[in-house]
Image (spheres, rainbow, N blue to C red):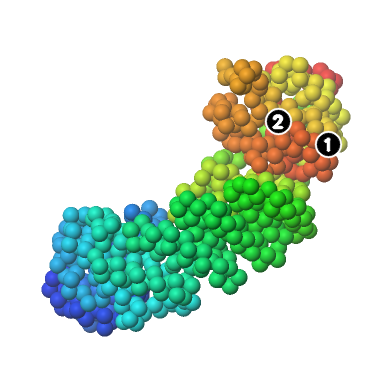
């Protein structure tokens, strides 16, 4: 919300609309201004009326219309306890909510509410007053009856649903009924609703059934059962009949919900056979959604969903086996749908600068420069970029994302994080993968590879030169010095197949070694009372704080994204299970990982480089 909008908000709060102001615009004439069934339309009508009144110098009308516009602006959540929330929340500011009108303005609103001839506006005024002051019981009664009056007016065409709809009972009408009955429940009338309310509910429910409005039927029947208006047996029979009639005609997801509704109703009646039959029919709608898409990747996703649904039913092994075979084919076919795209990045200047920096250096200077040639991104910076992208690409953030292996099998999924929701740690992890991938590429192509190539061209560097680093480093466990020296030498020489297969398997043990030296136990106790070392994933889950204390938050996060997280490079897993190919050894993530291990080996030696490491390397060199 801009500063100007915030000032306007404060001005609205100061400009109390009095009884005389409302009498001036005549609350009993609002229906003539608009017969809409939508709050947003009413808000715009009142905003335009306020603007016209301001042009005419009618301050009394301006105040009254502004208050009515604000009341219609609240975001409506009929199925939640927080029924009214701000229309806009941005930059630490928000639009108005009912509690902003406590005090004098609320007292005035309670006095004029019954005078309003528009049932939807009357309901909104009464409801917002009761919402912020639960002692206003008369407002609760007025709100409920007015919401139902609005529904009756819709069916009699006195109020109009202005948006195109294929249904005789649109979701807006169900929202109003749900809110009315929620208020009745809050004031102790869930099982004792007025006859007029029952009559309006029955009319709406019958209309939904007669017109095969599946979503409305599902919502209304659930509401009716909870209020004692409909029996489970009636729901079971009617839901199954509607699902059968609509199974090949209406939107599959809606049909599926009605099948599951019928299954739940039969389960409540103790009829497990009928419940299972309806659940299986619901799975058929999942497969119907699968058959409606052309992408093999999408077909595989729907098939996995169907397999999971059948497993939850139980006793469906034969159907599951058939779907497993189909899933394998879809996963194979999905591989041909995967494509690559590239973004040209000119790193010519960075490469040349790196080459010039290294050409005239001694070996020990080269190794020192290489160890600190780039830095790992900050975790907090990665997450800030993820939030920034979410704001820029709103719709993409609303969809669930999946990650597949080289055979097309989905190995990880992550839920969406639309605006307004606090993203999960998992969401940040997967969104950070793209940021890290870009960092790997820039670091490797612009700095690490040019440095290594220059070092190999200008000096004959082998494992002998790396042994002083390995022997003195607190990152290298005793007995593993020659392994690390060999791996580092192969990294510099460009033999990434040897470097990767030598260094990556060493990471997990080195992390355990460092933590053990700091007094942290990295062993786990099995059920049979035997002990074994924790894996990388277990250490990240159970010893994350200790890892962050030893290596820092940013490096620890890099361990997770590079070596551990399913859907990422998963270097530790892929290497341990023999799945790492020769081509993958030359990818940026792998080269960066090997360099990162070199950096970690050199980092503890930073202050002692000249006194211990440089002299030892010089002796070998000369």
Say the numbered circle drawn on residue 313: none
Residue 67 drawn at (x, y percent): 24, 68
Nearer to us: label 1 or label 2: 1
Does residue 126 appear in the picture of this structure? no
Residue at the image point whose x is 56% and y is 28% from the top: 542
For label 1, the SS is helix
Residue 347 drawn at (x, y percent): 73, 50
Residue at the image point whose x is 58% and y is 57% from the top: 277
Residue at image mark 1: 497
Image position of 268 with respect to 539: above or below: below
Residue at the image point whose x is 64% and y is 35% from the top: 559
* In-front residue for pair 255/350: 255
| Location of the C terminus (image quadrant) | top right
Q: Quadrant of residue 617?
A: top right
Residue at image mark 2: 597
Label whose residue precedes the other's in the sequence (1 or 2): 1
For label 2, the SS is helix
Q: Quadrant of residue 147?
A: bottom left
Structural distance between the alpha carbons of marks 1 and 2: 16 Å
């Amino acid at each position: 919300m801009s500063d100007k909008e915030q000032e306007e908000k404060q001005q609205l709060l100061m400009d109390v609309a009095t009884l005389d102001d409302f009498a001036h615009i005549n609350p009993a004439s609002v229906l003539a201004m608009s017969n809409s069934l939508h709050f947003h339309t009413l808000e715009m009508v009142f905003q335009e009326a306020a603007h016209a009144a301001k042009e005419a110098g009618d301050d009394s009308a301006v105040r009254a219309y502004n208050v009515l516009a604000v009341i219609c602006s609240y975001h409506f959540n009929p199925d939640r306890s927080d029924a009214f929330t701000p229309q806009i929340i941005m930059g630490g500011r928000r639009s108005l909510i009912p509690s902003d009108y406590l005090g004098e303005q609320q007292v005035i609103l309670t006095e004029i509410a019954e005078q309003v001839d528009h049932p939807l506006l009357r309901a909104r005024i009464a409801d917002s007053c009761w919402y912020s002051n639960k002692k206003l019981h008369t407002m609760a009664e007025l709100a409920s009856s007015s919401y139902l009056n609005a529904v009756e007016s819709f069916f009699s065409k006195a109020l109009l649903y202005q948006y195109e709809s294929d249904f005789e009972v649109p979701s807006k009408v169900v929202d109003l009924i749900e809110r009315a009955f929620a208020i009745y429940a809050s004031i102790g009338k869930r099982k004792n609703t007025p006859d007029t309310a029952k009559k309006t509910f029955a009319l709406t429910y019958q209309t939904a059934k007669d017109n095969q409005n599946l979503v409305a039927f599902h919502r209304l029947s659930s509401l009716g059962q909870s209020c004692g208006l409909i029996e489970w047996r009636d729901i079971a029979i009617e839901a199954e009949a509607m699902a059968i009639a609509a199974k090949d005609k209406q939107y599959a997801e809606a049909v599926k919900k009605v099948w599951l509704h019928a299954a739940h109703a039969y389960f409540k009646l103790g009829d497990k056979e009928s419940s299972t039959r309806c659940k299986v029919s619901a799975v058929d709608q999942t497969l119907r959604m699968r058959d409606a898409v052309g992408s093999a990747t999408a077909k595989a996703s729907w098939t996995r969903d169907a397999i999971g649904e059948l497993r939850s039913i139980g006793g469906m092994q034969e159907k599951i086996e058939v779907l497993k075979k189909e899933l394998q084919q879809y996963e194979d076919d999905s591989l041909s749908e995967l494509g690559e795209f590239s973004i040209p990045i000119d790193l010519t200047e960075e490469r040349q600068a790196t080459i010039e920096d290294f050409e005239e250096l001694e070996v020990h200077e080269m190794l020192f420069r290489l160890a600190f040639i780039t830095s790992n991104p900050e975790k907090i910076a990665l997450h800030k970029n993820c939030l920034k992208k979410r704001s820029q690409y709103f719709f993409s953030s609303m969809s669930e994302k999946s990650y597949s292996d080289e055979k097309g099998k989905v190995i990880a999924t992550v839920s969406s994080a639309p605006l307004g929701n606090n993203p999960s740690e998992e969401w940040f992890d997967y969104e950070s993968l793209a940021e890290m991938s870009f960092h790997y590429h820039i670091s490797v192509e612009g700095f690490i590879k040019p440095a290594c190539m220059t070092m190999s061209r200008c000096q004959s560097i082998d494992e002998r030169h790396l042994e002083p680093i390995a022997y003195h480093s607190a990152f290298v466990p005793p007995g593993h010095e020659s392994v690390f020296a060999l791996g580092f030498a192969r990294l510099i020489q460009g033999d990434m197949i040897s470097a990767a297969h030598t260094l990556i398997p060493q990471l997990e043990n080195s992390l355990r070694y460092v933590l053990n030296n700091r007094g942290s136990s990295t062993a786990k106790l099995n059920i049979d009372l035997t002990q074994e070392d924790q894996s990388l994933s277990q250490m990240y889950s159970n010893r994350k704080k200790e890892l962050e204390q030893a290596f820092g938050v940013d490096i620890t996060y890099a361990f997770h994204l590079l070596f551990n997280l399913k859907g990422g490079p998963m270097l530790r897993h892929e290497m341990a299970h023999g799945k790492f190919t020769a081509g993958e050894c030359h990818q940026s993530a792998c080269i960066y990982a090997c360099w990162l291990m070199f950096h970690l080996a050199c980092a503890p030696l930073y202050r002692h480089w000249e006194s211990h490491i440089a002299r030892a390397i010089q002796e070998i060199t000369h």
